[in-house]
Amino acid sequence: MTKYSKFALIALVLGASFFTSCSKDNEDTPAATPSIYARLGGTTLVQDPDAATGVMIEQGRLSYRKVVNTTIGLIVADVQNNAPGNLSAHFAPLLGEVGAGNTTNLAELVDNLTDFFSYNTGGTNAVNVYSGLSMVDAHNPAVNTRMGVKATSANYDKFEGYVGAAAVQNGVAANTQLYTDVVAVLESLRAPIVQQ
């Protein structure tokens, strides 16, 4: 993510915190909406369904990981079915690795996306720190060899559709404020990601 976009998201989270603390002083002012991360379960610890018994994960992080995994599954299904407008060209290097039995970079992608969205929507615990490439570099094939081609606006629309469908499949109804807020976060990333 570019520094500007990251700072904008952090400013929104901090701004929400500021308005929440101010609303306690004035009972006529409605309370601020909790962060997206909090609305996805926040820091409540739950059993990690993908780990050994006793390994716990924050519910907000698990919610994001589920959406990320479902999004990747939808992208792969469209590629395998040769669906119109699929994103096969973008993920060709990564899909080639997975097809050859190497899932290391796929696991890293899932972790990076989960970290990125968790941290930038209110998951401030150390487990949610994003240390990957900036959004510009992550989506530039000259810098990130796992990216096949640069994205167009139509490609990004398709990606947003995958994320929206994945969110709905994981319990975020499309007609809710939470869904609208998730889409707004995705839209805030359009400029650094769309490079063609």
Image (spheres, helix red, strand yellow):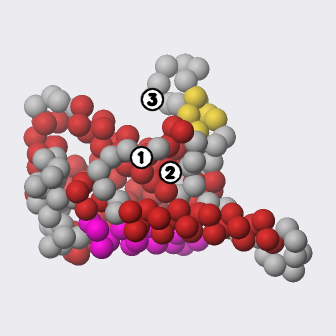
Residue type indicated by callout 3: Asp
Residue that appears at 61% across and 34% down? 46
Q: Is residue 191 visible to us here? A: yes
Residue that appears at 21% across and 74% down? 154
Residue 192, image x, y percentages: 29, 68
Residue type indicated by callout 2: Tyr
Viewer-side label of 1, 3: 1
Q: Which residues are magenta?
A: 175-193
Residue that appears at 55% across and 24% down? 55
| Residues at circles 1 and 2 in contact by the CB criterion of under 8 Å | yes
Magenta span: predominant SS is helix
Residue closer to the observer: 69 or 168: 69
Drawn side of residue 102 relative to residue 157, left or right = left
User: How many numbered markers are drawn?
Assistant: 3
| Residues at circles 3 and 2 in contact by the CB criterion of under 8 Å | no
Residue closer to the observer: 164 or 64: 64
User: Which class describes the residues within 10 Å of circle 1: few (<14), some (14-19), or many (20+)?
Assistant: some
Q: Is residue 186 visible to us here? A: no
Secondary structure at badge 2 equals helix
Q: Is residue 84 above or below residue 96?
A: below
User: Which class describes the residues within 10 Å of circle 3: few (<14), some (14-19), or many (20+)?
Assistant: few
Q: Earlier in the sequence, mark 3 or mark 2?
A: 3
Secondary structure at badge 3 equals loop
Residue 80, image x, y percentages: 15, 50
Viewport quadrant of the N terminus: bottom left
Residue assigned mark 3: 50
Residue closer to the observer: 102 or 83: 102
Viewport quadrant of the C terminus: bottom left
Residue assigned mark 1: 130
Residue assigned mark 2: 119
Please, which residue is most extreme toward the bottom here? 28
